[in-house]
Image: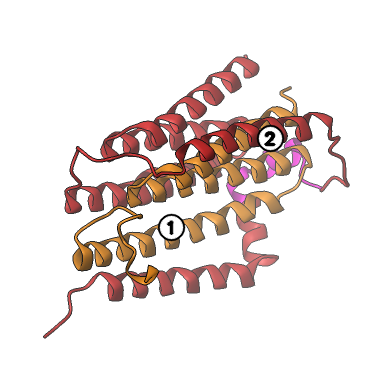
């Protein structure tokens, strides 16, 4: 039997990798992929707790997180296409029209 | 055996997740993300949630990643560019500190609480998909409907944002 802590540590490491990816990468597509990594880390946590606490609620929540992740990816990519059409770049630090 | 499988999945997840954020070519990042997602499905199988593993592969590897790769090919991102932001050193340093902090907190904490009624034997006797479906359509019916509304809004929003302006 694998202890619950192993899953929590795996999820924490995955979440922090995703967070660092969001912070350091310039390409908007890679930033979106890093956000998917963070959401998946949360999913691992939910399923691990559901398994070790003999519950079904965590597994149901994973569905809703996947729904939000799909919606977020669709909207994010649509914003990316729209921004690329208007500015000609996909780098997050070059899209700075609102900075003044 | 289970331990070995867990360590295999965990090692591949962490290494390919690192590849996602350090590969220069965004297409390589997408393939590394695919490997990560499939191995997370393996973790779900280890955690006795076979239906979630199937949904993970269908939704993430099937839908979201195909969408990302589609946009990637559509946009033609050039190969030669600066990969990282200016704050990269602070961000990597903060990530390492945060990993240490979280590992410490998890190692000293004891997790306890009331147990639910769904132990492995009960889920096995009913079937994983049936158990999830029964709860989803009774107890969580209202959140389920809200989720469908979120998907509708996302669909309309994506079409409105990405379409060309009609003159």
Measure how far apart labels 1 and 2 are at the Cα level.
24 Å
User: What secondary structure is the stretch in magenta mostly built from?
Assistant: helix
Residue B142 located within the stretch drawn in magenta: no
**Residue drawn 25% across and 69% down?**
B162
Q: Residue at x 16, y 48 (%)?
A: B76
Q: Picture coordinates of residue B64 (x, y %)?
A: 37, 51
Q: How many marks?
A: 2
Compared across the picture, whether B74 is left or right of B104 comes to left
How far across and how far down the image is residue B101, in percent? 71, 34
Identify the magenta region.
B117-130
**Mark 2 belongs to which subunit?**
A
Q: Residues within 10 Å of mark 2 (few under 14, many from 20)?
A: many
Q: Which chain does tag 1 point to?
A: A
The colour applied to the residues of chain A in this rendering is: orange
Q: Is residue B120 magenta?
A: yes
In the rendered structure, the answer to whether residue A10 lies left or right of residue A91 reads: right
**Residue at mark 1:** A70
- In the rendered structure, find residue A8 and report the number of the disc placed on it: 2
Give above or below for B31 relative to A28. Answer: above
Residue at image coords 29%, 76%: B160
Between B12 and B98, the residue placed more toward the observer is: B98
């Amino acid at each position: 039997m694998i202890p619950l802590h192993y899953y929590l540590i795996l999820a924490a490491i995955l979440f922090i990798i995703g967070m660092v990816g969001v912070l350091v990468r310039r390409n908007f597509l890679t930033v979106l992929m890093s956000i998917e990594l963070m959401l998946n880390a949360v999913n691992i946590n939910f399923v691990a707790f559901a398994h070790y606490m003999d519950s079904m609620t965590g597994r149901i929540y994973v569905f809703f997180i996947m729904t939000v992740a799909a919606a977020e990816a669709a909207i994010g990519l649509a914003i990316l296409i729209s921004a690329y059409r208007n500015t000609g770049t996909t780098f997050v630090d070059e899209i700075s029209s609102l900075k003044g | 055996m289970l331990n070995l499988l867990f360590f295999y999945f965990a090692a591949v997840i962490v290494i390919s997740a690192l590849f996602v954020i350090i590969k220069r070519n965004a297409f390589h990042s997408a393939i590394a993300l695919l490997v990560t997602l499939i191995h997370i499905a393996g973790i779900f199988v280890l955690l006795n949630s076979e239906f979630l593993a199937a949904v993970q592969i269908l939704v993430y590897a099937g839908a979201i990643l195909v969408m990302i790769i589609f946009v990637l090919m559509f946009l033609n991102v050039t190969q030669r560019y600066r990969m990282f932001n200016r704050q990269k050193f602070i961000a990597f340093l903060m990530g390492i500190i945060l990993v240490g902090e979280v590992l410490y907190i998890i190692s000293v904490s004891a997790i306890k609480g009331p147990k639910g009624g769904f132990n492995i034997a009960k889920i096995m006797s009913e079937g994983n998909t049936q158990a999830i479906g029964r709860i989803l359509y009774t107890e969580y019916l209202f959140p389920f409907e809200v989720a469908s509304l979120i998907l509708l809004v996302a669909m309309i929003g994506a079409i409105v944002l990405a379409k060309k302006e009609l003159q």
